[in-house]
Amino acid sequence: MNACVQHFHFEPGTLIAYDGYQLVVTGSVKSGLAVRDRFLADGETVRHFVLDDGKVHELLQRHDIVIDPEFSSDRPDDLPDASKEPDFENRKPAERRTAYQKEAWCHAARIVLKGGPYYVSRITEHYADIKAIAHDRQKLIKRGVDDNGEFGARDWGPKAVSNFCMAYFAMRQPHPRVLINKTPKGNTRRNLTQEQCILLDRCCEFYLSTSQPKKSSIVALVNRRFKEVRAEKQERGDNSDFATPHRNTVYRRLGKFKRLQLVIGREGFRAAQKEFSPTQHGVRALKPGELIELDFWKGDVFTFSQQSEFWGLLTPDLQAVLKDGEKKASGKKKKPRQRLWICVATDVATRMDLGMGIAEKPNERTVIEVLDMVMRDKSDISRAAGCTTVWSQHTGLGTVIFDTGNEFFNEAVQTAILNAGGSFIYGRAGVPMDKPFVERHFGGLRTLFADELPGKTGYSPQCLVAYDKEGMAAFNAEEFRLLLTRYIVDHHPQRPHMGLFGKRPIDAWKEAQKYGAVRPPTLRVRRNATGLKVKRMLTKEGVRVCGLPFGDPSLFPRHIENGEFPVEVRIDPNDLREVTILVDGKQIHLANQRPDLGRHSIRTLMAAIKAMTESKPDDREFYEYVLAKHADGLAKKIEVGIEKHGLPSTEITPEELDWFETSYCFRLHILKNPEEARSADMGDLLAGLPGTGIHTAEDIAAEKAAADREGQQRAQAIEGEDDVAATTPAEAEPPDAKPPSAHGRKRPSKPIATADTSASKAQPPTGRLFTGTPKGKGKFT
């Protein structure tokens, strides 16, 4: 129903680089983006191509794509204003000649520096070569100055040439009009000294007071203060001119204050927030993602506090373990029933929900997870929840609006939004009209969703007085999340919305594609903005997360010369194909050395590690080989169990990840390229049953007895000989001896040395000796 390909908006001049191509966006067409090649040969005409929306969507899912929206600054505000400045052809001949001379220096710099960058240091280094080519070009185009019958070229210094190149090559189609000297406007002569200007500014700042003084009082204040300063200067023997500014000068200075400064200073911050709030009575947006409203709502449904038994077996319920530990230490008992908080991100242009989170109480990590959902395709969530409609809608962050709650008024949330390329505005707490669209959406959640469920509470404590709210609770958090996901994906977008003039949100989303949605950031930028931030040690192998190896030692040889090096790691919980580390302020992207495990989320991988290592903690080496198969089987069990037991949370905090690694990943060292190992059925392995590839206690005991008997015979044979001789298998093993292992195979043991012979003369006998306790599989050395 909503299978149309999204159309994202790219500003003209944006650079897109991938697979050796470097394309510059020139415009937007109905089915994609019009682009041109960045590099053009001399005399080559510009050719335009079209990247269809499907290709753009595919590129945004890649890690290696580079998108630079600031590549070209050839925008209308960067060009001369045609209404104020005459066009290039109507300029004076001398001005046009100077512009062509500057252009000759730009072309010369491009030839010598091979396309840039045009730094002052590089131009200074090659100044002689650039100057020679520039003079020749000026002579060829006859743009020099005739000096007594000889050609005289025009010269500029390296800094000026650098500025010319920056302005000239920043245009989509370079033209010498950008090199025209700007005509000075107005009165450029300063009548007041710097000291007079500073004193005048200080006096005018008294106008920004809640007492709201008149302008005439500020003129009187200026006269008084200038008179006092002039008297002080004369007492010091300074008779320099320090005239008082005219009252018209004071009025002009007061007129330079912006409206926002005047309202904040003279009427107060609350009045300014009310007048200049962009959401006052609602703001209409055209493009999806241009304006996003975000808020928490305490759901009007009582749910069970305990987690589902099904998910307790499949996923490490780390959050519940940590919270239970805190409550046990404080002596407080957790309530059996609760009301969950729902966080929703709503797109103002189309009323589509782009993100949803559930928490026991508002917190900044849930907000960051919802922002991450806004910027990524959520088809996996809708598919797991069994929704009919695909939840594929996603955009970049334009302007995010929320109130001043502690979960939003947070440095981590602000940093995440800014790093993702968005901006944020705080509305007033308790003022619904500052976020009217998400507040109206919460009203629909109450009437169309919560009121239909058992355990509903109503809109106030006086509502449903005779109804047993807590006693009617029927769902836990996972089941409630499943129902809410289906409502947001299948039900809400299909209902006509009066704010959209009777259109459905899904139809409004399709129609808004003609404007193009705000472009989401690349995967690496999104991971840096909303990913988990943890501390790890960088070694010659890279870094490890839950035992998974990430890294390439060739990327950071200098930092591991002296052993381990602490770094900050950014992890995307839903994409483990690579991680990002921060070394000396520089981002380095490390690929997963086990790509077969990269397709799993961090929660599924943690569930597999927990379930496997809890059965036989010592068999970690064997588990490393079958971890991918077990994770796949676990993911299938989760998909089957969602309908009956609910949808699990995908949220995780850095503290929970650290706690899990300490509890379950100690000594877990997953190999880069594991070999295939023979193993029993996964169910038999986890249950401890015998089978192919499993060494039982009887097998280990038989092998130990055979090894002891063989060792005693070997020692007796060596003591009876003067010289150490090699023992044949027939002499070392009785005819009736059983095979030393369940597989009937023997491995050569280490050389044996006795007190009568030196270790250097000892020869390795055949057979095996048991030298320690079994290590999970009954290994012998």
Image (cartoon, rainbow, N blue to C red):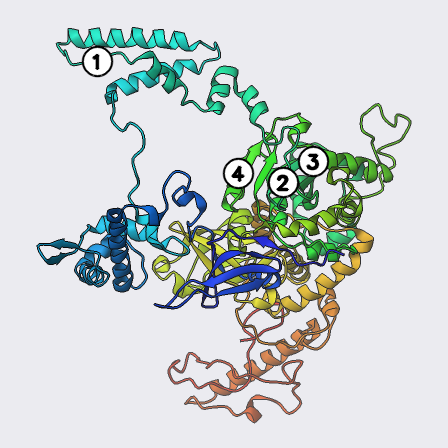
Label 3 sits on a secondary structure element that is helix
Q: Mark 2 and mark 3: span between their CA atoms?
A: 12 Å
Where residue 285 is drawn, which disc sits there? Answer: 2
Which residue occupies 69% across, 35% down?
A: 437
The residue furthest right is: 466
- Quadrant assignment, res 327: top right
Residue tagged 4: 414
- Is residue 263 left or right of 83 when viewed as pictured? right
N-term-proximal mark, 2 vs 4: 2
Amino acid type of the residue tagged 3 in the rendering = Phe
Q: Mark 4 and mark 1: span between their CA atoms?
A: 48 Å
N-term-proximal mark, 3 vs 4: 4
Which residue occupies 64% across, 29% down?
A: 434
Amino acid type of the residue tagged 4 in the rendering = Gln
Mark 2–mark 3 contact, CB under 8 Å? no
Foreground: disc 2 or disc 3: 2
Where residue 242 is drawn, which disc sits there? Answer: 1
Residue 488 location (% of width, % of height): 75, 46
Q: In this view, does 183 lie above or below 50?
A: above
Q: Mark 2 and mark 4: span between their CA atoms?
A: 22 Å
Amino acid type of the residue tagged 2 in the rendering = Ala
Which residue occupies 36% across, 57% down?
A: 559
Mark 1–mark 2 contact, CB under 8 Å? no
Depth check, front residue: 360 or 105: 105
Q: Mark 3 and mark 4: span between their CA atoms?
A: 22 Å
